[in-house]
Amino acid sequence: MSAGLDLTAAQQALVIALCALTALVAHLALAVFNDGVRPFLLDFVQGRSGRSATGAVAFGLSAGFVFGLGAPLALSSGVLNPWLLFLPTDVLGLLAPRRWLAPLLGGAWGAVVVFGLGGADQLARGLPVDFLTAMRQMSTPILFLFTLFPVLAVTRQFGRARGALTAVLELALTVLTLRFWPGVFAGSLAMAAGLLLLIGFAVREDLRGRAEGQPAQDGDDALASLFGAGALRLRRHLPLFMALGAGVCVLAQSHVFGGGEATSFLIGEGRYAEAAQVDFYRVLGFVPLIATTALASGAYGIAGFTLVCPLGYLLPDPLSAAAVGAGVFALEVLALSSLGRVLGGLPSVRNSSEQLRGAIGETLGLAILFGSLLAAHVMGGGFAIMVVGGLYLLNEAMGRPVVRMAAAPVAVVAGGVLLNVLYWLGLFTPAEG
């Protein structure tokens, strides 16, 4: 794994340019990265909500993830991530009062990341208690617990028996992969099998409903009209989306960017094919969610269906990545209407997307918490666990001013700073190694 962030001049320029572009796209309310912000953009586009109010919503939903997840994840994995790059450009773009100002603010944030984060990385790694190196302990829990998210989704949607079947299948495939293919990420086949079971169960449920002649739900005509307006709005800005797809795909191809928590550590270890597998499985689960929110709000995702990320990891050069990214985004935007009509007749598949989203958040939340406690143990044994765990529990008791998923990494950073202060006061000795 990379010892830290180390970007070439071309990669730095790419990050700055892409942050400028994403801020402009957010200013135009055409796309944001935060799924929670997208539904609010419909009111903004239709004039029922102002720019400052919408930007405040975006800030409230994003700030914790930027500093609690995005920055610590980048510093510990040596790889940039969308929470660090694109959540701030959502906010800056929405708050910018003029169109020309949005890309300037976005580019400035990109410059802060590429020039400031490396310095922070070197400074932190030179401290007596190196909490950034300790945070690498998060990689193993994230990679292995993330494998189980299909099990949770199947159990919640289709019951204990099918959930148990999915769990047994995933466990068996993980054991076989560890035993016979040690060079392959152990969760790859397990996640694929779990997702295929979930999708299979959902499609079977929907086909059964059609066979039983279930009537269409009330409001389908109004929903179709709303979806059509959203799709038309996105198609009118197709060239801008193609540029966005090209930029994200080229950034992924540079191998300094990971599209997810688990992916960041795999990219940092040079395991690009396995990172592509993991992100591709997420695509399968999140297409219904991204498609329906994009059609309803008229605002797309900064990474689209995120398919450009796994494709980018595998492409040989930036030119091919730019062409593929632009083409994929064009196809996605043009296919949104048709996809919306298909999903309209597959309620179980749409429900599976919601279940997957919740399951991914739950598994990653546990993995990040457990990994953070492992990092604390590396920093200072039981005392550091008490400090980090105590800060996490204090955040819970205070009503979570820091969102739960980001609270544990924030606690590691804060705990690491505190341990360094205690060291300088002669009150603490760092753990050996």
Image (cartoon, rainbow, N blue to C red):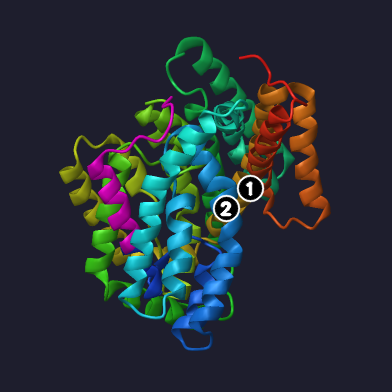
Three-letter code for the amino acid on which mark 2 is drawn = Phe
User: Which is more toward the observer, 257 or 166?
Assistant: 257
Q: Is residue 109 above or below residue 341?
A: above
Kindly give the residue lying farthest to the left in the view shown: 319
Q: Determine which residue is flagged by label 1.
A: 406
Q: Are there few (<14), some (14-19), or many (20+) residues within 10 Å of tag 2?
A: many
Three-letter code for the amino acid on which mark 1 is drawn = Ala
Q: Which residue is drawn at 52% across and 29% down?
A: 125
Whole-percent x, y for residue 222 in the image = 50, 83
User: Which is more toward the observer, 311 or 393?
Assistant: 393
Which type of secondary structure does the marked residue at label 1 adopt?
helix
Which type of secondary structure does the marked residue at label 2 adopt?
helix
Kindly give the residue lying farthest to the front in the view shown: 425
Whole-percent x, y for residue 178 in the image = 52, 15
Query: On the rendered structure, is 375 left or right of 399?
Result: left
Check if mark 2's residue and mark 1's residue have beta carbons within 8 Å. Answer: yes
- In which quadrant of the rendered image does the N terminus lie? top left
Residue 318 appears in the figure? yes
Whole-percent x, y for residue 421 in the image = 69, 35
Kindly give the residue lying farthest to the right in the view shown: 397
Q: Are there few (<14), some (14-19), or many (20+) residues within 10 Å of tag 1?
A: many
Q: In which quarter of the image is residue 213?
A: bottom right
Between discs 2 and 1, the one toward the N terminus: 2
Q: Determine which residue is flagged by label 2.
A: 65
- In which quadrant of the rendered image does the C terminus lie? top right
Residue 152 appears in the figure? no
- Residue stretch in magenta: 1-20
Q: Does the magenta stretch include residue 255?
A: no
Whole-percent x, y for residue 122 in the image = 46, 33
Question: Which mark, by number, is residue 162?
Answer: none
Q: Residue at x 71, y 44 (%)?
A: 159
